[in-house]
Amino acid sequence: MAQNPHIRIRSGEGSGHSGHSGQSEYGPLGPGQAPANDPLKGLRGVMAGTHIMEAIVILLVLTVITRVDGGASATTFNMVYVIGLGAAMIVAAFLQKVRWADWLNIALQVLAVAGFIVHPAMGAMGVIFALCWWYIYHLRSNLMRRMARGLLPSQHLDEEGNVRRPATPAD
């Protein structure tokens, strides 16, 4: 069986005790093998798409700060902040494969929530997208736990691409 590069064993794990009463360390088919396709690849696509959507929303704040209250919020700092953050999010969408992408995602989200200094609408959008990012990372954590326990169907494919079934005792 190939070792899965996405599984990180913490100290205390892998000893046969999962910390959950009645829950085995592996699924009914065992630990499985490394999935043929990287399951995190799709999640990176979701993260990239979220950055693009958030960049569009952030850049739309330019219309808010230039038109609301006669453009009173359209200071040089605010314009540079919004344009810079929107551009950084577009760049970050293409950097989801790098090792430090998680830190970049979090830093950009902190800057988006800090958008309250530009306009309350920008800060509110930052909070909404922060909830989206929390949910994405929650899904990622769940996926990695399932992968570590061998619960992904792609970890149990045979040579023909069919899911292997557990061995049944001969009667």
Image: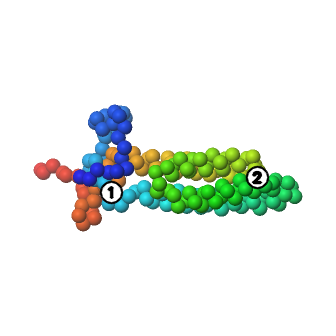
Q: Amino acid at mark 2?
A: Phe
Q: Amino acid at mark 1?
A: Pro
Instruction: Label 2: state its secondary structure.
Output: helix
The residue carrying pointer 1 sits among few (fewer than 14), some (14 to 19) or many (20 or more) residues within 10 Å by Cα, namely: some
Q: Nearer the viewer, mark 1 or mark 2?
A: 2
Task: Tell me if residue 25 comes above or below residue 77 in the rendering.
Answer: above
Which is more toward the observer, 111 or 43?
A: 111
Coordinates of residue 96 in the picture (x, y in percent): 50, 56
Instruction: Check disc 1 and report the residue beneath it.
Output: 35
Residue 100 shows in this picture: yes
x 76%, y 52%: residue: 77
Residue 98's disc is none
User: In the drawing, does residue 134 fall left or right of residue 6?
Assistant: right
x 81%, y 60%: residue: 66
Picture quadrant where residue 76 is located? bottom right
Mark 1–mark 2 Cα distance, whole angstroms, equals 48 Å
Task: Tell me if residue 157 comes above or below residue 31 in the rendering.
Answer: below
Instruction: Check disc 2 and report the residue beneath it.
Output: 77
x 51%, y 52%: residue: 101
Coordinates of residue 43 in the picture (x, y in percent): 47, 56
Coordinates of residue 40 in the picture (x, y in percent): 42, 55
Residue 58 shows in this picture: no
Name of the residue lying farthest toward the left:
171
